[in-house]
Amino acid sequence: MPLHELIGYLAASLTTCSFVPQALHTFRTRDVRGISLGMYSVFTAGIALWLAYGLALSAWPIVAANAVTLVLAGAILGMKLRYGSRSGR
């Protein structure tokens, strides 16, 4: 595997894994008060576009990272939409 591809996979792994603690916390507590609906909406749309970009380029580190991140961010956004009114936001 070329060095640049290895760096891509490492970067993708680290940035994707950074969402896991927030997702787990949100799933466990259903506390979405500290989550911005606007930020997560725009972020999730951006991740979807990064995924499309990675697919268009066949850049598999970009595809893998953004596919997983899209699932995590989408789940957090879904919980914000579902539970946000209960927390007063």
Image (cartoon, grey):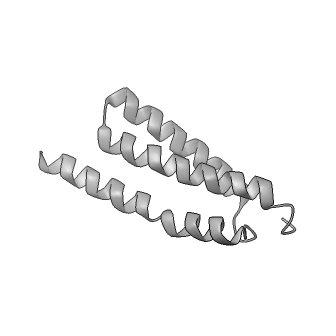
Quadrant location, the C terminus: bottom right
Residue at horizontal 49 percent and vertical 64 percent from the top: 20
Residue found at the far left of this picture: 2
Estimate the x, y position of residue 74 in percent, counting from the top left.
Answer: 61, 49
Report whether 77 appears left or right of 81: left
Closer-to-camera residue (11/29): 29
Residue found at the far top of this picture: 56
Residue at horizontal 53 percent and vertical 39 percent from the top: 48
Residue at horizontal 44 percent and vertical 46 percent from the top: 66
Report whether 70 appears left or right of 56: right
Estimate the x, y position of residue 54 in percent, counting from the top left.
Answer: 38, 35
- How many numbered marks does the figure carry? 0
Q: Is residue 18 above or below residue 77?
A: below
Q: Is residue 28 above or below residue 53?
A: below
Quadrant location, the N terminus: top left
Residue found at the far front of this picture: 28
Estimate the x, y position of residue 36 in percent, counting from the top left.
Answer: 71, 62
Q: Is residue 29 above or below residue 73?
A: below
Q: Is residue 68 above or below residue 49?
A: below
Report whether 70 appears left or right of 55: right
Estimate the x, y position of residue 88 in percent, counting from the top left.
Answer: 87, 68
Residue at horizontal 58 percent and vertical 53 percent from the top: 73
